[in-house]
Image: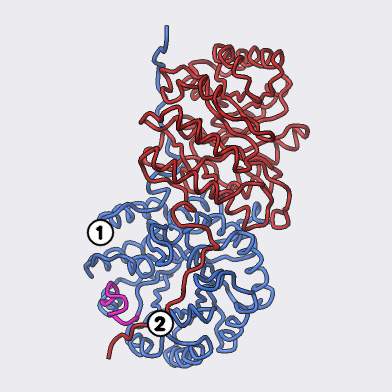
Chain colours: A red, B blue
Amino acid sequence: MIWECNDFINVKEVGPRDGLQMEKEWIPTAEKIKLINALSKTGVNGIQVTSVVHPKAVPQLADAEEVMRSIERHPGVSYSVLVPNERGAERAVPMKADEWELMHSVTESHSLANANKKVDESLKEHEKVVKLANEQNVTVQGGMATALGCPFEGKVPFSRVAYVAEAYYSMGIRSISIADTIGVADPKLIYTTMNRLINQFPDVEFSLHLHNTRGMAIANVLAGIDAGVRSFDASMGGLGGCPYAPGATGNVSTEDLVHMLDLMNIPNGVDLNRLLDISKIVETLVGHTLESAIYRAGPADQLQVAPTAQKKIGK
Amino acid sequence: MIWECNDFINVKEVGPRDGLQMEKEWIPTAEKIKLINALSKTGVNGIQVTSVVHPKAVPQLADAEEVMRSIERHPGVSYSVLVPNERGAERAVPMKADEWELMHSVTESHSLANANKKVDESLKEHEKVVKLANEQNVTVQGGMATALGCPFEGKVPFSRVAYVAEAYYSMGIRSISIADTIGVADPKLIYTTMNRLINQFPDVEFSLHLHNTRGMAIANVLAGIDAGVRSFDASMGGLGGCPYAPGATGNVSTEDLVHMLDLMNIPNGVDLNRLLDISKIVETLVGHTLESAIYRAGPADQLQVAPTAQKKIGK
């Protein structure tokens, strides 16, 4: 039962990749490196540093090599790179990441729109990436986009999720991230999906990648924990977004996640105050208001000074 | 277990009072009446129409009498008025509300700051209000401000909550609303508090009044349902706010609440599309962006058209 849970929760910070890639204004490489170095000291379990996506597709991450080369690596923090395809994998080899994150759409229409490939074609290519990772002794995490809803197809049958999970499993992958890419999952869907996956693949470590597009990300974290998930992606300040929901919020914010876990006495090892210091820098860098509730409102334990007298009203 | 819950959830719309009272710009009385008439057709269980607070304290609600006189009353909808004190109760009598909502701080410092009275003094005054309500045959709901956290005292011992609940109970009140006035409650606190209250007062109907100040309101709804709560306050567009957390969000938004309940197949009787139509009007009236995630992003079932071809990148 979630109300008795005091298992350790792993928090992976995905802001430097999934957050910044949505930012139109160029963030100088030196600033990215400073941010990641600061994030390394917060206690997060992992940092998704960058992506070896084509620079024309995501100009913001064109400095992937320089960022990976220049950051300080802290023991206990796993530094990952998103590897979208075989060409990217070749680029990723010299970066010496601790982890390669694969991303695979669960639905055919999103796979075509996002990777210009059918699901099975894309899985074939992923096999080659995994082979290369194994040769390089790099851990692989298999990601699943649109696993909980697709912008083009709507609800996604569980059989599709299980199909891609099975494909990853047969490649030898034992770490799988389930993404609510467009932020449509409700807590019940999260619970039932993760419960079935964990039962079907008991030796896989599943993590959740949640977007707060429809305000349910924090509730979905609860549902995930209740189903047995112990690893969550989150983004500094709630950076990120969804091209299919303009004006919508991004990833679940790291500070909102950690703040709730702390209040619930669920250990997570992350220092909330350091996260808030980083968000202050992030807000200046991106030049717009952050979505993080805790950044805006402050932590729950901030007390106010009580007024000493009330102004008399009326006669 | 919440994942199997399909009990009916009662939604009370508190936007016309708790939402609008935070708006600095005057909303014309005719517009308020139109809004409330539209809300009456959404399927909500109740509407908190206004408050008989002193007009100098909350100028926005100075038209309480005219609003209550002019709205159309729909069968099945309970129209309530917030009655802060004895003087207010006398004003409320001719309004013929279905329900008077009392509001009482659980903590001494908030009681002094908000009502200029000690907790026990204020409870004494509430007794007189309840007596008047009984004479008028009006239902009374006892509200508890700062029940889940106080801006001046921080965490609130459960004994304080039980003390005020007991006082309400001994006045004959069997409907009690527990408010997270400053939006600091986490889901575990909600679950344990509501669980204990429901066990201690099995013949009282408890409802939750949640603020989304720290992004946990929707998760707190889940926790409340899990503990057995079946009635929730919510505010159109997420209107409302917290004087102790500037820039923070307001009440849990009615559309976000109904949207999640619908996705989870939890019956609630409210028409989401009508709520969204109302929020559009509300946004124009208040002249600022609404906090509601669903108003900003649209419901989860809105599909997009898949692109027919992908632009070629690179060579």
Q: Marks 1 and 2, Cα distance to the nearest angstrom?
A: 26 Å
Chain of the residue under the numbered disc 1 shown in the image = B
Answer whether residue B61 is magenta in the image. yes
Image quarter in which the C terminus of chain A is found: bottom left
Q: Position of residue B254 (x, y in %)?
A: 43, 58
Looking at the image, residue A106 lies above or below residue A180 = above
Asked if marks 1 and 2 touch (Cβ < 8 Å), the reply is no
The amino acid on which the numbered mark 2 sits, given as a three-letter code, is Val
Element on which disc 2 rests: loop
Looking at the image, residue A152 lies above or below residue A56 = below
Q: Which residues are magenta?
A: B52-63
Provide the residue designation for mark 1. B285
Chain of the residue under the numbered disc 2 shown in the image = B
On the picture, is A72 further left or further right than B14? right
Provide the residue designation for mark 2. B83
**Residue at position x 55%, y 83% in the image:** B173
Residue B59 sits in quarter = bottom left
Q: Which residue is at the front of the view, B303 or A314?
A: A314
Element on which disc 1 rests: helix
Q: Main secondary structure of the magenta part?
A: loop
Q: Position of residue B295 (x, y in %)?
A: 38, 49
The amino acid on which the numbered mark 1 sits, given as a three-letter code, is Leu
Q: Position of residue B64 (x, y in %)?
A: 29, 77
- Local crowd at mark 2 within 10 Å, few (<14), some, or many (≥20)? many
Residue B92 sits in quarter = bottom left
On the picture, is B48 further left or further right than B68? right
On the picture, is B153 further left or further right than B99? right
- Local crowd at mark 1 within 10 Å, few (<14), some, or many (≥20)? some
**Residue at position x 52%, y 19% in the image:** A65
Answer whether residue A267 is magenta in the image. no
